[in-house]
Amino acid sequence: MDSVKGQLTLRGILIGCVGCIIITAASVYTALKMGALPWPIVFAAIISLFFLKALGRRRASLNEANVTHTVMSAGAMVAGGLAFTIPGIWMLGFADEVGWFEMLLVALSGVVLGLVCTVLLRRHFIEDADLEYPIGEAAAQTLIAGDAGGKVGVKLFGAMGIAGLYTALRDWVGAIPAMLLGNVSIPGVAFGIYNSPMLLAVGFLVGTGAVLVWFAGAVLANFGIIVGGSAAGLWDIASAQGIVSSLGMGVMMGAGVGVICKNILPKAVHMLKDTRGSVVLGAVVSAADAADAGADADVRAPKRRMRLTAGLVACAVAAVALVICFGLQLGPVPAVIVVALAWVATAMSAQSVGQTGIDPMEIFGLIVLLAVAAVSNVPQVQLFFVAGIVAVACGLAGDVMNDFHAGHVLGTSPKAQWIGQAIGALLGAVVAVAVMVILVSAYGPEAFGPQASFVSAQASVVATMVSGIPSVPSFALGLTVGFVLYLVGFPAMMLGLGIYLPFYMSFTAFLGAMAKVVYDAVCKRRRAHLSPDEQAAREKAQAETGLVVSSGLLGGESIIGVLVALTAVATGLGA
């Protein structure tokens, strides 16, 4: 479906922009204060459908609601990209060297790169690769259930309510601990079970095989390298942690390069052709088509569209490169590296979000930062700009791909979604920068850091890594291994995530996958006595129930996470 009529509407844009301002502001505060950022997509989907139905005289379609929530949620990941990187500058005492102008250039550069990369990568990741995109799937199922009601709605919103109540008791009331088994002390290992319905649901939705690889990476890193290696006297715990972080980043980077080499470059021309119907061409192509008549015009149109696509993409990328080079004073070589590796990083982000629902955007920013630092003498402040640009691009890429997946399920026009994403991302960039300026002006740079009011955990990691890769040999090994594994069809990105992420996150997702194994076994036993036709029907219904309930658990925590953030924005500034 290529037409945007009835999907991208004025009322949808207005509702989406108001929600975008609120959610983006809340996301900045959440990312800085709590060191986490829940996906707002499911929350935005529900709010969009509600207000479209409440304020519109005509019936709101699922596609209109889908585009509206695309506008509404876009700014959150832009906010995350900034909040997970830029505060590191303040922690290192360079607050006077960065202001609103530099932050806005970083945000806008990341937005443009994210939008350009994802419009070219959409076909591969959404249609060809057919990844799960659990967050986007949850958003689509939420809209379907909200529109249809019935048993599906009861299941989804019942699970959502349970997860929401559980999350409120954990985060608002403090009656439930955030971590189970957190008192188990294993030197160098963040052991425990994260008390998160969302992460359990991600493990359930992603698939057993992929999560087993994810968990294997976590076991290898934490109990093989950190515990085993330090016990054998090969290195101390601090060195082991550096090896693990370097190895994990290398494996993810290698997998990202593999995605580009194996899946993207061979299909680059095809993907450029696919973008001829994209939003950046919409008005121009329509005008050109209207001006041309007859068979000759029909023959020339695809070639003209492809040339126009390539030209617009080149202009956008060149403009970003110039901004990076002169506006942010990085120089030509770093500018080229950032633009080139942004393709790799956004592909890594799309792959990670598609398989796990997790977008470690600051890690991808760190990878490019380290690449720039390795070949140039860029000052430390400018290195944070590099990480910020890439983190924003990757955060937006994850959000765009989730939205594209939801649109693929619902039959929404990618053109309409891309326009909505662009509107929300640009607005979100302005809002995110404004909120960060307000916070640092109100509290001072000293309020940001591991022991300060705004812990800014991810930015603290970036600040630590600015000095260089902890273990270059481990990074090189991971790069090679990740690349080779991806080429032979092994889920290398999952392995890299398991190596890099804290063990408690991997362990919790693993428990979610085990819950899926148990659920499937119980369902299989219950339908064993049925006829083959009845078994097929029951299997489909049971699979749908598992999908809907797990989507509800995921959505319930994300909604309450956003509400907690909104409350923090409303009441926390004076705290």
Image (cartoon, rainbow, N blue to C red):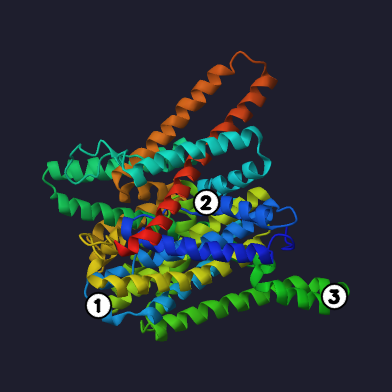
Query: Which residue is disc 3 drawn over?
Result: 296
User: Label 1 neighbourhood size at 10 Å, few (<14), some (14-19), many (20+)?
Assistant: some
Q: Secondary structure at mark 2?
A: helix
Residue 533: x and y, percent? 70, 21
Query: Which residue is disc 2 drawn over?
Result: 43
Residue 71: x and y, percent? 57, 63
Q: Secondary structure at mark 3?
A: helix
Q: Nearer the viewer, mark 2 or mark 1?
A: 2
Would you say 45 lies left or right of 363 here? Answer: right
Where's the N terminus, which quadrant? bottom right
Which quarter of the figure has residue 144? Answer: top right
Decide which of tag 2 and tag 3 comes sooner along the chain: 2
Residue 125 visible somewhere in the drawing: no
Q: Amino acid at mark 2?
A: Phe
Residue 258: x and y, percent? 45, 57
Residue displayed at 54% across by 56% down: 401
